[in-house]
Image (tube, helix red, strand yellow):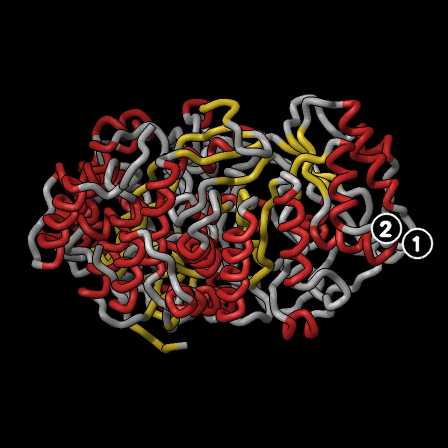
Amino acid sequence: MRFSDRNLEPVWEKVQAGERLSRDDGLRLLETDDLLGVGRMADHVKSRREGDRVYFVINRYISPTNVCVLSCAFCGFARKKGADGAFEYTVEDIVGMVGAEVREVHIVGGHHPDWPFEYYERVIAALHTARPEVQIKAFTAAEIDYFWRRSRIEPKEALTRLKAAGLQTMPGGGAEVFSTRVAKLLRYTGKADAERWCEIHGIAHALGIKTNATMLYGHVETLAERVDHLLRLRAQQDASGGFLTFIPLPYQVGTTRLVERPTPPTDNLRTIAAARLLLDNFPHVEAYWVLLGEATASVALHFGADDVNGTLEDERVQHMAGAQTPAGLAREQLFRMIKDAGKVPVERDALYNVLQVW
Amino acid sequence: MNVGVRVCEPVLAMLAEIRDKALNGKRLGRDEGRWLLTEAPLLEVGALASEVRFARIPDKVVTFVIDSNPNYTNVCVTDCQFCAFYRKPGDPEAYTLTVEEVLAKVAFAAGKGATTVLLQGGHNPALPLEYYTTLVRETRRRFPQVTPHFFTASEIQTIAEVSRLTVGGVLDRLWEAGQRTLPGGGAEVLSERVRKRIAPKKGGPSAWLEVHRAAHRRGFKSTATMMYGHVEQPDDLLDHLDAIRELQDEAGGFTAFVPWSFKPGHTLLEKWVKQVKGPNVYLRMLAAARLYLDNVPHIQASWFSEGKPTGQIALHFGADDWGGTLFEENVHKAADYVNTITVEEITALIREAGFTPAQRTTTYEILRTC
């Protein structure tokens, strides 16, 4: 393979040999002008692992509430209790939201000041009883940590009880960027930090709960902080091994306006590709179309991504933060993204069991 | 399912051969073109196109033009299947602007800093030659900073028929009035089969090619476009690229190649097109064109028709030009496709992709680096 940036050649040697990339390699991938060089290496890795397969899941995002005690500077979703636009759903509301074809529900919400842990437990139990065939992916490590902060329920107990109620996997949110500098700057020191976030995922993995991981990038973080974040996830995966997917989340400028402009599509592609190359122990890397937009998500399937997430009929969190993409894409639209890239759509469940090759 | 290394030996050999040809001024053959358009790994095509782009245009500069794209009439007798813009003569929604109304649009564009006005319209048999020549002359006179980039090939033909002149005769009159460039629209796909199917009254590929040949011989510069994503097959696209490449060898007046995907909204062709072609198909088309059209200087990324993300990514797939601001546009709008941009946004998007933005003229001379 020829690179317009010769500095990528030693990285390519390692990729071909299946050697682990270093922090310096990671920086090189994010700093180079040779976007397609990074993409081609990531495509090589993705193709070796998954061929032309691209996964999707028919799922439903549910936020029980947007009421949140935190004031993270990047978040356009959270509201204070009683504020305009604040919402709080009942257990019945939530059960009613799950449509007939849904295979997976994804439940993430604000850190509500009053709700007891038992409420969350009831949500999971009621959903599981009403729709036993639907897989439940619920509560970020930040929320699990909050159950301890608010109700003094240890993560292990919380996860054990939630699992008993029907929880199957955990989403990867709440990681933001693993950097105390950025956490202070963006006022998210009041939630699980890198150590705690990883600890909770480790506990989940030990309990047999598979999880995802994310990184919120494209705001005030440095490229080195992105690399360190990815390496921290890689180390955790070495230790506990239960991550299924890494999902890079480009920051949405929306109303929080931490930066003037969203990070560009070329940076989104580069970040996805770098993640695929650095996270050699993660089974999947996702192009989350709701945040990337359809075009970039579709092209990202050539830059190392092997998943586009799902149908997401009601993605309130990102929608209220200003994502331009329409909230409800039908299966045909997912096909369009996957087929334009010349890939094979594979419908999966939350655990990546193949349901149908389309 | 294909699990394994994507870029295997025969693919590498083919890529190496194409690279060798492209970098050493040797022409790619039709089979190579077909492979690039269909099977070749997308990012390999893109990387090769980018390498060739920098071999020809070494500076990490991406140009753009400040322009507007108004229309003087939507009256048209040609009934193209892909068009949502036109109205038949007498239709309640039919319109034809007066010379002064068109010039007001030129004034609007000039007021926003435009150096190019791309003016095109339907094939309206009611308009005399003087209408067109007056538009050119008055634009030149009143707005000397604006290049009148007026009238596509099929409009020139219509003018010739209406005024009982030859195409060359019309071009001579426009030249006298001060016109020096022609827009490249109306080519669609330059294949007999495709044009018969989607634009039967426009004539075969030679109709479009003749006008550009005659124009280039007179010293006009023009662009070449291609609208794909409807009924064409890869061989139709190759017919198109071959035709452009041959005419450029002969007459040499093309400044740029500009492909875009068909937008089916409200067109007669809509029900026949199952899937609109998306970003990956576009990037492949652009990169293959950069490699195949070895004699066309510039390849334009179309943020307008493909969206800004794809436009930006295209700069890494062999494109060296961003196109224009398109302050006014009505043809895509008629197909429910709307997209707008500012100069600030253009320069930001180019810069964010790793390039230096530069404002250019209609004929690709750089006016200022931003």
Would residue A111 be visible to someone looking at this image?
yes
Give the SS element for disc 2. loop
Q: Are marks 2 and 1 in contact (CB under 8 Å)?
A: yes
Residue B116 higher or lower than B129, as above or below: below
Q: Is residue B105 left or right of residue A324?
A: left
Label 1 sits on residue? A82
Density class for disc 2 (Cα within 10 Å; few <14, some 14-19, many ≥20) is some
Q: Looking at numbered disc 2 in the image, what kind of residue is underneath it? A: Ala
The residue at the point 25 percent across, 36 percent down is B38
Residue B369 higher or lower than A335, as above or below: below
Give the SS element for disc 1. loop
Label 2 sits on residue? A86
Chain bearing mark 2 = A
Quarter of the image where one finds residue B323: bottom left
In the image, A97 versus B220, the foreground residue is A97
Disc number placed over residue B215 in the picture, else none: none
